[in-house]
Amino acid sequence: MNQYSAAQIEARRRFARAFRRENRPDLTHVLGNGWSLGQDMRRMTDQQYFEKAVQLFNGRIGIARFAPSTKQDLFRAAGV
């Protein structure tokens, strides 16, 4: 079983809470600078926005599938 740091778990919890509150949270306000999805985010559907955010989040954390690819699984994994 993988051991995650407290900071990684808290980051996933904050990420999940942001998506629990709204479909397109501003990730800069949630997780700090450097979490922009880029210029094309206004053209994305809510699902595409979520998928891109998960991809970016997992890349920054450095653990594949640390944040699950569906909202329900993310909320369950983060306990929110």
Image (cartoon, helix red, strand yellow):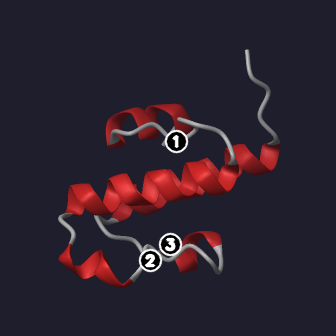
Asked if residue 63 can be seen in this view, the reply is yes
Q: Earlier in the sequence, mark 2 or mark 1?
A: 2
Answer yes or no: do the residues labelled 3 and 1 have beta carbons within 8 Å? no
Which quadrant would residue 63 be assigned to in this image? top right
Q: Residue at x 43, y 40 (%)?
A: 75
Give the Cα separation between the discs numbered 3 and 2: 4 Å
Q: Tell which of 30 and 41 is nearer to you.
A: 41
Which quadrant would residue 60 be assigned to in this image? bottom right
Is residue 50 positioned above or below 78 on the image? Answer: below
Q: Kindly identify which residue carries mark 2.
A: 26
Helix, strand or loop at label 2? It is loop
Inspect the image, locate mark 1, and give the three-letter code of the amino acid beneath it: Ala
Inspect the image, locate mark 2, and give the three-letter code of the amino acid beneath it: Asp
Answer yes or no: do the residues labelled 3 and 2 have beta carbons within 8 Å? yes
Q: Residues within 10 Å of mark 1 (few under 14, many from 20)?
A: many
The quarter of the image holding the N terminus is top right
The location of residue 65, given as percent across then percent down, is 53, 35
Give the Cα separation between the discs numbered 2 and 1: 17 Å
The location of residue 66, given as percent across then percent down, is 58, 38
Helix, strand or loop at label 1? It is loop
Inspect the image, locate mark 3, and give the three-letter code of the amino acid beneath it: Leu
Question: In this image, 27 relative to 19: left or right?
Answer: right
Q: Kindly identify which residue carries mark 3.
A: 27
Q: Residues within 10 Å of mark 2 (few under 14, many from 20)?
A: some
Q: Residues within 10 Å of mark 3 (few under 14, many from 20)?
A: some
Point out which mark residue 67 bears: 1
User: Which residue, as the protein is rendered here, is positioned at the far top?
Assistant: 1
